[in-house]
Image (cartoon, grey):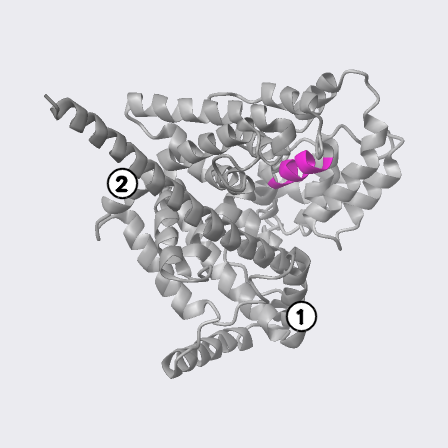
Amino acid sequence: MNTTTDKEQKESIKIEEQVNIELNNLSVSELETPHNPLYNVKVLDTDRTKQVGTISAISGQDGIMELMYSYLELTDVVQLERTCKRYVNVERTRRIAIGNALGLEVGRDPLDHALINYINNTSDSSTVSLQKFLLKIKPHRVKIESIGFIIFYVYKMTMSLDPLSFEVFLESTFSNSSLHDTNVLLGMIDMKFSSRRAFQIAKHLLRGDNNVCGILKRKLLGRIRFELEDENERGDNDFSERFFLYSMDLEVMRVLISIEGDGDDGHPEELHLLKDFALLVLNKTIMIKGVARRQGMTKDDPIFLQIIAFNSLFNKHIPKSFPGMVDGDDNLSVRDSIKQYWVDDPSMIQIWKVALFKALKWVYELEIEGRLSDYLLISRIIQGEEIIKLPNSPINNFSLAAFLIMKSVDCAGAVSMSVRLESKEGLTDLFCDYYEFLRLYEKGFRELKELSERMLATHSAAIAAVNHAAAQP
């Protein structure tokens, strides 16, 4: 860790004092759950029966909320929660909708106990509970001979799952999948990558074993290269915007650094080809599009103004003390160090919630402007510049802003993400993911830059050789 100066220490103390003043101004109930500016529940005036007669009439009936949620798309859950004080447990109602999306109904299925336990046991986080639930029902559901049909059926049944739940569904249901299963999943991807779901499945496939799925991964990366070249010919950035919005570049970066060494080092030729494909994709996106966008940014650029805005927010509201440690022997030690941070100073839970809610309000405003993808594109280069300058993964406004945008996209928006930060476990998960992102990008960007410079040098040498030969009499 860098040694802080007296000025920084004084500034840190001042910021924490300001946050404590904000906390002291809250009521006891608000102190337990700090005010979330993105999630203001609007209380309906039940006396105005003409305007809200229907809602008022059904709000007192037990079970009516479950019935209503069974007909909702998951993306509507949070918005509906904000319109009526009756909707007091968004997590429970989200789980009811997920159970319905999977074709399960209380009282009409032999898996009643698992479903009821999943709906009511909200002490576990969303992702942990869903993972446990899927593991329980999987043996009862997979009884059809054709795995391809099963995957197709389940995929269709889960189209209405929110993005984060679908991610957990993929990892729980198709972890350690065979080559045949992954080929079936590949066949379900819209190869124009026009939807979030296509990117989610593609990212899941890229996490597979290189030795088992190397050819399949190269096929997928080849398709991505084709889409990048196609958009260059069209003169637009439609594909690149979705590529960065759903953080596909980070998954390609995982592939790049998963293959150690290059040249004749004992790896099969297929793995070298896979690494080359990953390098070409990242070079076309981060190193070419990112650098060009970064160099073209002016002080009047909307993204530059947003960078300045978050920098101000970071310096004013984000505590200098971050939970736990970034690096460790494994992810468990990192998680334990974060948990110990909350134990050592419980007040930091509330301080961090207040700070993160303010940061997510900034993300929400960026969502409204439609500039998330453009911000991520530029931030990749800025963060890379910071990595080259510093010996360790930098915890700063650039990396934190980019990370919060990515997590918000994963949760289908800053509003949904803000709800998931109301528990200590949610905060712990957030910082574990943040530190994992820092480690990945530090290692990945250094290797990408080194390989890109080597590729450029080889290309320049080849051109010089051709020019020299042409100049000979």
Report the front residue among 276 and 107.
Answer: 276
Q: Which mark is residue 292?
A: 2
Q: Is residue 40 visible?
A: no
The residue depicted at 88 percent of the width and 40 percent of the height is: 113
Q: Which mark is residue 319?
A: none
Q: Is residue 52 magenta?
A: no
- Magenta range is 164-172
Amino acid type assigned to the residue bearing label 1 in the image: Gln
Residue where numbered disc 1 is placed: 340
Question: In the rendered view, would you say 311 is above or below 128?
Answer: below
Tell me the element at label 2: helix
Question: In the rendered view, would you say 367 is above or below 31?
Answer: above
- Measure the alpha-carbon separation of dots 1 and 2: 43 Å
Q: Is residue 255 left or right of residue 449?
A: right
Mark 1 in CB contact with mark 2 (< 8 angstroms): no
Residue 428: x and y, percent?
63, 60
Q: Quadrant of residue 244?
A: top left
Q: Which secondary structure type mostly characterizes the magenta part of the structure?
A: helix
* Count of numbered circles on the image: 2
Residue 176: x and y, percent?
71, 33
The residue depicted at 27 percent of the width and 30 percent of the height is: 462
Residue 404: x and y, percent?
49, 52
Question: In the rendered view, would you say 352 is above or below 25?
Answer: above
Amino acid type assigned to the residue bearing label 2 in the image: Ala
